[in-house]
Image (cartoon, rainbow, N blue to C red):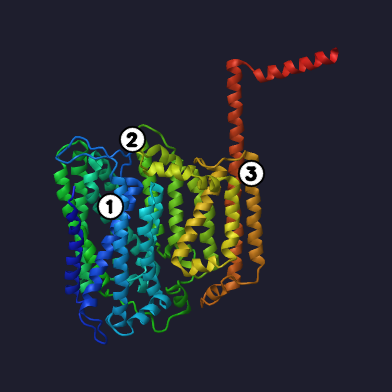
Amino acid sequence: MLPPGGALVLLGGAVVAVLVGVAASGAALPGVLADPGAAVRWGLPVVGAVAEVASALTLGALVLAAGLLPLRARASDRVRAPRDGVAAVDGRAWPQALVLAALGAGAWTVAALVELVLSYANVAGQPPTAADFGAQLQLYVTQVELGRTELSVVVLAAVVSVLALLVRTPTGAAWTALVALAALWQGAQTGHAAGAASHELAVSSMTMHLVGAALWVGGLLGLALLGGRLGDDVAPAVSRYSVVAGWCLVAVAVSGTVNGTVRTGLDGLTTAWGTLLLAKVALLVVLGLLGLAHRRRVVGRLAAGGPARALLRRLVVVELAVMGAVSGVAVALSSTAPPVDDTPPADPTPAQLLTGSPLPPEPTALRWLTEWRWDVLAASAAVAGAVVYVRWVVRLHRRGDRWPVLRTVSFVAGMLVFGWATSGGPAAYGMVLFSAHMLEHMVLVMVVPVLVALSAPVTLALRALPVRAAALPGDASRGPREWLLVLVHSRVGTVLAHPVVAAVNFVVSMVAFYYTDLFELALRSHLGHLAMILHFSVAGYLFANAMVGLDPGPARLPHPQRLVLLLSTMAFHAFFGVSLLQSTSLLVADWFGLMGRPWGPSAIDDQQQGAAITWGIGELPTLALAVGLVFAWARDDERAARRRDRTVDRSGDTEMDEYNAMLARMAEREGR
């Protein structure tokens, strides 16, 4: 589909765009106080562009191997009859995707290392050839947080390059892709996002932006390089990629809008940074239109076996060139100072020193609904979850299947509550009030999981998602449905979903979180906060699904044992809430005790209010679960009775007849 030298189109476009953008913005002008030299000033953005492309190729190739490329059960490497002048080869593209990932990760490692050296030279204002540069660089990567972050990107990229050569399964490719995502997350914390006033929002949106762009660019580049080895599997591979590209376009657009809002306003659009931002938006629109044309015009003709490969080749070259330009403009933006002043305030308040944001106003009933502290990742997950669920329901209805409306309402309500808990009032006040944090926690672990469990999302997904082997006979790759089944039936998933294990995890997690340093980590680190949201949401869903859920997975206990397990959990919540209510020791005292709030109760009184919330909100959903479990128990008995009545009407009461015969035999023996 693309000759080997065609991959340089993307890299060349990125480098040219970087040079033009840096020259237009004046980012490469000599420093006033200290100048590291022209080689550092011009080389840093160029190396950054190379690292962007290499990281994109790495992640894109890994995702192709994890679930987009067809995987034949027997990779025979047989050559079949040529089509469109290209020999159709089976079984060779999948392992080559891992080789591409390893090569991309190797280039990423080298580029990230060079970028680390040049970035420090730029910060220090001296060239790398200075006499004491090596000693200062060592201090930079060991003592300075930014240097340690950049060094972690180098280490993680090197780990990815090794793992990509060792793994041989889609599962291994998926785990390696997670390591690459960790490197991208670390990279998102450098640049302007590291010093933005809205640090958490900037880092989250930048991570979303980098991952979306990397999947978009790297996936297409991987397909372009592997097209000659796909043979007749080109059509399904391109079709699967086009779906991923659509989601990536949305992710890049949303995160780019958030970044633009954080870093500039309407007045900032007239600056050099604003001009580069508008250029990037224009290129993104062009790229989106090209992607739409790619999906509508090429995929269908390619699947039909028509002469679409030449058109696809031209479209890939043009799209890669535009992608390279977008990537280059992005690097130029990162090398240019935004118009928003990120200088810390001269006299910060205690709340600003701790949370990085001003203290919110005193909470009222209305402000719990109007105050927002947006988490773009959590909010996007809630919106995407609701959209995907509704699309699955529509897909079922189009083929004539029914899905209960109340389940759809339950899931959408769960996503709305999740979005409010992670970005609304509980999130805005949860950083300064322990009671608000406990409200957010209890909603995530007790309210949202019950709504999600009653909506049966796994069952809906298994009914709505297509089967890979049915669409392409002989394909052993894993699509969304296959990956979902792997997670549900895996050994780890089976153990975690067991009712007893889910209850223990539900109970122990809370104690371990609040009485160890994990609580402070979730307050001081945005990554720790996201991990808290993910863990307790999943733990709550596993427990609720084991109690009253409809999804497959857990080996559910009989109703009496479930009720006992649920009441035991309720008792623990009461014990935990009462013990916290009676405690006179302040949790994370150097956080909540030093917030400097001029309103609201004292820190210890607020902690006791949080304990009351833990007790109350923890008990009410658990009590509702108990009532629902009793009703489900009664309905189960009624269904069993109706089944028995139908059996008696159809074939007689054999059990009663056998019982009467047994009594007769016993009486006969007594008579003898």
* Place of residue 44 in the rendered image (x, y in percent of width and height, measured from the top left): 25, 73
Q: Which mark is residue 474?
A: 2
Task: Return the residue nearer the eye: 277 or 107.
Answer: 107
Task: Return the residue nearer the eye: 258 or 471.
Answer: 471
Q: At x 59% / y 34%, what residue is drawn? A: 635
Q: What's the distance in space between the residues labelled 2 and 1, CA to CA?
A: 23 Å
Residue where numbered disc 1 is placed: 219
Task: Return the residue nearer the eye: 528 or 288.
Answer: 528
* Place of residue 414 in the rendered image (x, y in percent of width and height, measured from the top left): 46, 50
Answer whether residue 552 is visible to the viewer in this image: yes
Question: Which of the 4 image quadrants contains residue 336?
Answer: bottom left
Task: Please state if 155 lies on the left or on the right of 665 as rendered.
Answer: left
Answer whether residue 249 is visible to the viewer in this image: no
Density class for disc 2 (Cα within 10 Å; few <14, some 14-19, many ≥20) is: some
Contact check, label 1 and label 3, Cβ < 8 Å: no
Question: Residue type at mark 3?
Answer: Leu
Label 3, secondary structure: give it. Answer: helix
Tell which tag, 2 or 1, sits nearer the viewer.
Answer: 2
* Place of residue 148 in the rendered image (x, y in percent of width and height, measured from the top left): 40, 72
Residue 122 drawn above or below residue 326: below
Question: Residue type at mark 1?
Answer: Gly
Question: Residue type at mark 2?
Answer: Gly
Density class for disc 3 (Cα within 10 Å; few <14, some 14-19, many ≥20) is: some
Task: Please state if 45 lies on the left or on the right of 202 as rendered.
Answer: left
Label 2, secondary structure: give it. Answer: loop
Q: What's the distance in space between the residues labelled 2 and 3, CA to CA?
A: 46 Å
Task: Return the residue nearer the eye: 277 or 147.
Answer: 147
Q: Which mark is residue 563?
A: 3
